Image: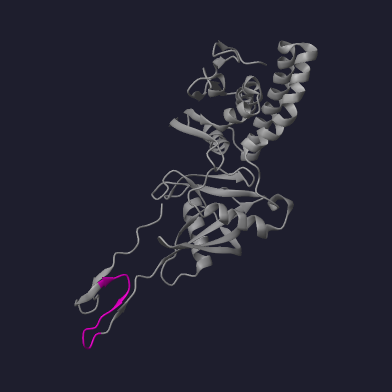
Amino acid sequence: MPLPLPTPARHCPRCGAAFASPAAGARCTTEGCGYAWYPDPKVAVGVVAERDGRILLVRRNHEPALGHWAFPSGFVDAGEVLTDAGKRETREEAGIDVHIDRLLGVWSAADDPVVFVAYAGTLASGEPVAGDEAIEVAFFDATALPPLAFEHDHEVIDAWRATRGDTLTAARPISLLQQRGIEAEVLVPLIRRLESELGVERAHAIARETIEAIARQQGRDVADALGRADLPGFAHVKDSWGGAGGDLAIETLRQDGERLDFNVVGCRFAEMYRRMGATDLGFLLSCSRDFALSEGYSPALHLDRTQTIMQGYNYCDFRYRLAQTTPVREDAGGGEAVPPTQ
């Protein structure tokens, strides 16, 4: 959300005389005054700060974009050098020092008075700590960033990748939806063949065991990459599922250190499997991963879910919690609660 444009000036700030017509920029015509008044744009600076290929983001605790993830950023003070402002904002918001490496670019828009200058930086040693202007701070893998706060942020990331000069930055990573589509092109024909050779029940059991083993390992990998296995950390993973284009429409009901409750009310994954003629396999190839993923991320993280869009319901009900009780899981046949497959 851009800041409002400056209000046109009606009176001269020096002598108080009324301008002949209100204007965004004007010169006083009063004899002996002649003051030129212009509403200068406001300059902000941000830093794509990394450590070992992981990018530091802060979750904003103020408008605009309250609650969204962004780079450490803020307005430049009068007389302040741009790179010094980037270092200051990183220190204030994330409690850690950064070395400014290179300029990434300058962004502006016709309807926004803020000019945004972005730098790439390398973080000093130590762990970040959320400052007064951040709800929390976290590292994210550069290939799995959550939805970012501002429209130009993805262009900033593209510029960071283009100037980093290694294989990680060669291209924008594919979305989870695209990844599932590529996998389905291979797995759907394979499972169909197994169905004809072994029967539907046995074929699906083999596929489910294999897919859940992969998902369980992915959960462990995520926890290792984040360096944490708590519920707020898992919420970062959830934020990346829908991709920048809204592949999942998510309504968050509760998100704190004890619970993560949300409904998925729109699912392009289900639409994709339907277009492929594999509606009956969509739950197996996609939804069945969720329990194993959370188990791999942390044995104490439990998911309760009783219905999914893939099964024909209007929404999916995800309820994550830290607990020691048996999770509630729907089966592929229509929502009956059964223990998860081990």
* Residue positioned most to the left: 17
Residue 88 is inside the magenta segment: no
What residue is drawn where x is 48% and y is 29%?
265
- Image location (x, y in percent) of residue 102: 61, 64
- Image location (x, y in percent) of residue 77: 42, 66
- Residue range in magenta is 22-33
Residue 32 is inside the magenta segment: yes
Q: Nearer the viewer, residue 130 or 321?
A: 321
* Colour scheme: one colour
Q: Nearer the viewer, residue 209 or 310?
A: 310
Dominant secondary structure of the residues highlighted in magenta in the image: loop
As drawn, 284 above or below 91? above
What residue is drawn where x is 45% and y is 49%?
131
As drawn, 289 above or below 119? above
For residue 74, side relative to residue 104 (left or right): left
| Residue 294 sits in quarter | top right
- Image location (x, y in percent) of residue 147: 53, 44
Can the viewer see residue 84 in this picture?
Answer: yes
What residue is drawn where x is 47% and y is 45%?
68
Q: Quadrant of the C terminus?
A: top right
